[in-house]
Every structure is written in C-alpha cells, then in structure tokens.
Image (cartoon, helix red, strand yellow):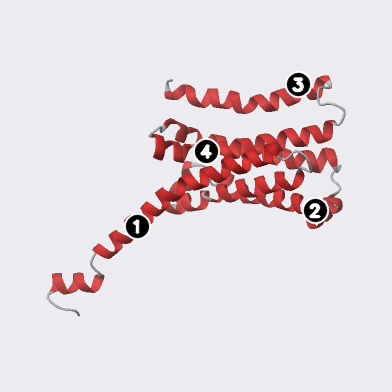
Amino acid sequence: MPPRALKPIAFALLLAPLAKMAADAATGGLGANPIAEGLNRLGFWTLTFLALSLVPTPAREILGVSWPVRLRRTIGLFAFAYGTLHFAWYLGVDKFFALGEVGRDIGKRKFIAVGFAALVVLVPLAVTSTDRWVRRLGHLRWKRLHRLAYLAALLGVLHFLWRVKADLRKPLLFAGAVGLLLLLRVPFALRRAMRSRSAGQSSPSPRLRLRGEGGGER
C-alpha cells in the first residue's frame, strides 16, 4: 500500500463509527434508550482506538512492521476526539449541562471519576501531538510524556469495568489486550535500561577525562 494512502484510509475507518452513530441517531436506530446507547458506543470506540494507538510500537519492535507507526498519532488523536465526544454526550445530552450534578457524579461515582481522569490524561498528549511540540520538548522528553497513553488506557479499562454491572466480557477483553500490550514492552524497556546503564559505566567521568587530556586536574 502506498504510504500516502495510509492516512486517508485510516481517517475514513476511524470516522466510520461516528458516521454510523449519526445515521442511527437520525433514523431512530439507537434503540429504546438512545442516550445510554450513544454513551456506550462513544466509550467503546474511545477505548478501542486508545488500545490500537498502543499497537504500533510492539508491532515494530517484535514483528519489524513499521508502517503502523505513521498512524499512531492519528489514532491517538481520534481516541481523544471520541473520548471528548463521550464526555460531551454525558454532559450535554444526559445531564443537560447541569454542572453541579456532573461535579457530584465525579465525586461520588468512581467509574465516572476514573473515566474523567483518563480524559484529562489524554489532554496533554493531544496538545503535544504535533512535530513542533516534538522539537520543543525534545524527542526523549516527548516520548516519556506520551507514555501516559498507557495510563489513560488502564484508566479507560477500569472505567469500563466499573461501569458494566452484568456482562464483563468486553471490559475483560480490553483489560487483556491492554495488559498484553504493556507486557510486550517490558523486555524492550529492560534492554534499553541495561544498554543505557552499560553506556554510562563505560564512559569516563569528566574528572578522568580532564586528567587524561590535560595532564592533571585543575
């Protein structure tokens, strides 16, 4: 597949659930409880895209497949967009912008508090998703910041688990997928840490370099 075709195809696929939901809303296809159905769909796709945004790194490191890395930021931004719509649906359609009631819900209902925390975690990742921010922060600091995507995914899974009261199959499936993606990173993280430690031990200290180059310490 030509690299230029990747993003347009990704955009179309990522927008498809929202288009389907809009069509269902217009034709009465959201069922007997359209408010709950809308919340459920937007939350499901938020977590789906958030989990998918974690796939490119292990795909490259384990399978040697690099093209998904080009879509990582796009998928992550769509996860944030769907998460924002999920919260906006809850705020506007479910609660009619009753901010006091929303605040009480966040304080008293732990699944809402955790879901809100996941959205807050995604905000700095969305803001710093551009190449300009990569240059501004430096690649290493930017990568460290964007590892918060794993925290957001874990919070999203917890939100889903606490939200569902009966059928836990879907949230447990997400928990397994996110847990696996985290485990796949562990060997590579350990390897990088060992490499960094070895490099630090093998490089001479500034004092030793001064003695070797200048003939003595000043």
What's the distance in space between the residues labelled 4 and 3, CA to CA? 27 Å
Q: Amino acid at mark 2?
A: Arg
* Residue 90 vertical placement versus 121 (above, below): above
Mark 4 vs mark 1: give the one in front. Answer: 1
Tag 4: amino acid: Arg
- The CA span between labels 4 and 1 is 28 Å
Mark 4 or 2, closer to the camera: 2
The residue beneath circle 1 is: 194
> Circle 2 sits on which residue?
109
Per the model, the C-alpha gap separating discs 3 and 2 is 32 Å
Mark 3 falls on what kind of element?
helix
Q: Which residue is mark 4?
A: 73
Q: CA distance from mark 1 to mark 3?
A: 53 Å
Q: Position of residue 29 (x, y in %)?
A: 81, 22
Residue occupied by mark 3 = 23
| Element marked by disc 1 | helix
Q: Quadrant of residue 199?
A: bottom left
